[in-house]
């Protein structure tokens, strides 16, 4: 019977998971699935590695922390794989200044991570809910936190610094960056696909409902578009991205909005949804004939191209551009529009390769190598967990 690790990737409305065999050097996916708590009847769906249906169950209602569904996951694993589960690995969005790599969770560490909730109010509670649920269901089960901020832990001034009094920086008010588990995986895949680019000046564009860019040199993050929180940077599904701080003061002082109302506006009512007035889903907007939908898409590509140029400034040039994430992997129109805006930098996307959306998509005359590389955050977490339970720490 294999040694297995259950990997949980908590989103805003559902939790993706994968069960990995970690007996060998490289984890192998055994099954994957979804815990959807927001349907009328919350459900658990489990599929095989190729997407074949294995199991599905629904609940009439959930308890406060959704532990019924987590208990169903454990029951499925025990039924199919007996006593094989060695750990549960969690994607935790914010690790703050303290955590530069994966850690085995204790009550003390979990409390410290809960204290970071103001820095990621949309994400941190969602990430920690399964931690508490599994601790209640199976107190002795090892749980491991893997952080979206860890890949950017080496960010240094000026890239890490805000232009505010330094006493706040001493208290941890700095740029942290996110999507690190995705960037780590894609950087590794790029080094396998095109090893000659592993040390070159690279920008990875993780474009999805949440979106950010990472500038890499020698495979390490030296700049990124998100900052103290996952609210900064690019236009996102419902998040505003970079905004004039004066807008926030105006909303509070002249629109009489409370801090809570402003927070909800910026996290839930802005971005593609706010500009289009109809949807946060890029697929819906691309299919729409409404002018507001087109304007939302236009703003998305405008700001993304601006940010690529900004990352190139940090790098002192650009040798490679990689698209990943739900939009980056599947929306050829978005890749094409960003490429057109960056033509002045020598970026040239080949139309036929862009339609195929696999591997290298740059034209022969492009000064920049361009790739589409699917991300796999769950695999990154599985690798870290496997190394940690074997007694080796991965950084």
Image: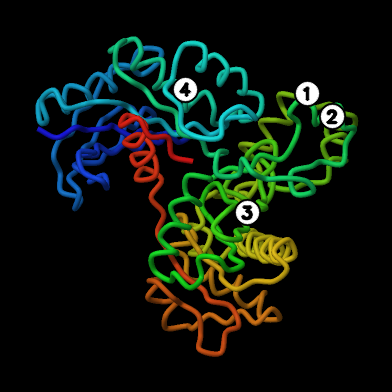
Residue 348 placement (x, y as % from top left): 57, 82
Label placed on residue 252: 2
Mark toward the start of the polypeptide (3 vs 4): 4
Mark 1 highlights which residue? 258
Would residue 234 be visible to someone looking at this image? no
Mark toward the start of the polypeptide (4 vs 2): 4
Q: CA distance from mark 3 to mark 1?
A: 24 Å
Q: CA distance from mark 4 to mark 1?
A: 27 Å
Q: Is residue 321 above or below residue 162?
A: below
Q: CA distance from mark 3 to mark 4?
A: 32 Å
Q: Is residue 184 above or below residue 192?
A: above
Where disc 3 sits, the SS reads helix
Mark 3 or mark 4, which is nearer to you? 4
Mark toward the start of the polypeptide (3 vs 1): 1
Label placed on residue 81: none
Mark 3 or mark 1, which is nearer to you? 1
Residue 371 placement (x, y as % from top left): 47, 70
Q: CA distance from mark 3 to mark 2?
A: 24 Å
Q: CA distance from mark 4 to mark 2?
A: 31 Å
- Tell me which residue sits at (39%, 69%) in the image: 193
Mark toward the start of the polypeptide (3 vs 2): 2
Mark 3 or mark 2, which is nearer to you? 2
Residue 102 placement (x, y as % from top left): 46, 32
Give the class, few, some or many, for how many residues have Cα within 10 Å of label 2's Cα (few <14, many ≥20): some
Where disc 1 sits, the SS reads loop
In this image, 8 relative to 239: left or right? Answer: left
In this image, 382 relative to 229: left or right? Answer: left
Mark 3 highlights which residue? 276
Mark 4 highlights which residue? 128
- Asked whether the residues under the numbered discs 2 and 1 touch, taking CB atoms below 8 Å apart as contact, a structural biologist would say yes
- Tell me which residue sits at (51%, 17%) in the image: 109
Comparing 76 with 144, the one in front is: 144
């Amino acid at each position: 019977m294999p040694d297995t690790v259950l990997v949980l990737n908590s989103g805003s409305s559902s939790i993706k998971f994968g069960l990995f065999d970690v007996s060998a050097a490289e984890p192998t996916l055994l099954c994957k699935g979804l815990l959807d708590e927001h349907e009328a009847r919350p459900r658990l769906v489990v599929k095989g590695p190729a997407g074949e249906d294995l199991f599905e169950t629904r609940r009439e209602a959930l308890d406060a922390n959704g532990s019924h569904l987590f208990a169903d996951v454990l029951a499925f694993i025990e039924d199919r794989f007996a006593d094989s589960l060695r750990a549960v690995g969690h994607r935790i969005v914010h690790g703050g200044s303290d955590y530069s790599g994966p850690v085995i969770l204790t009550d003390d560490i979990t409390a410290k991570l809960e204290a970071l909730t103001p820095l990621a109010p949309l994400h941190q509670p969602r990430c920690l809910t399964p931690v508490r649920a599994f601790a209640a269901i199976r107190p002795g089960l090892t749980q491991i936190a893997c952080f979206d901020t860890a890949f950017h832990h080496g960010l240094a001034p000026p890239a890490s610094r805000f232009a505010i009094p330094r006493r706040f920086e001493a208290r941890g008010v700095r740029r942290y960056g996110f999507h690190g588990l995705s960037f780590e995986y894609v950087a590794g895949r790029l080094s396998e696909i095109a090893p000659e680019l592993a040390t070159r000046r690279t920008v990875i564009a993780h474009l999805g409902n949440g979106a950010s860019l990472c500038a890499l040199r020698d495979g390490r993050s030296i700049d990124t578009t998100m900052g103290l929180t996952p609210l900064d940077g690019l236009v996102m599904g419902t998040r505003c991205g970079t905004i004039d701080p004066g807008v926030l003061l105006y909303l509070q002082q002249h629109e009489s909005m409370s801090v809570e109302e402003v927070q909800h506006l910026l996290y839930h009512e802005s971005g593609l949804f706010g500009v289009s007035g109809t949807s946060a889903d890029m697929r819906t907007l691309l299919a729409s004939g409404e002018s507001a939908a087109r304007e939302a898409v236009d703003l998305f590509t405008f700001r993304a191209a601006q940010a690529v140029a900004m990352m190139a400034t940090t790098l002192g040039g650009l040798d490679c551009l990689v698209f990943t994430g739900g939009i980056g992997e599947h929306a050829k129109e978005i890749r094409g529009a960003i490429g057109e805006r960056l033509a002045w930098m020598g970026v040239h996307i080949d139309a036929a390769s862009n339609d195929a959306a696999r591997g290298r998509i740059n034209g022969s005359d492009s000064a920049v190598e361009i790739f589409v590389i699917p991300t796999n955050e769950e695999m990154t977490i599985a690798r870290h967990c496997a190394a940690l339970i074997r007694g080796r720490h991965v950084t």
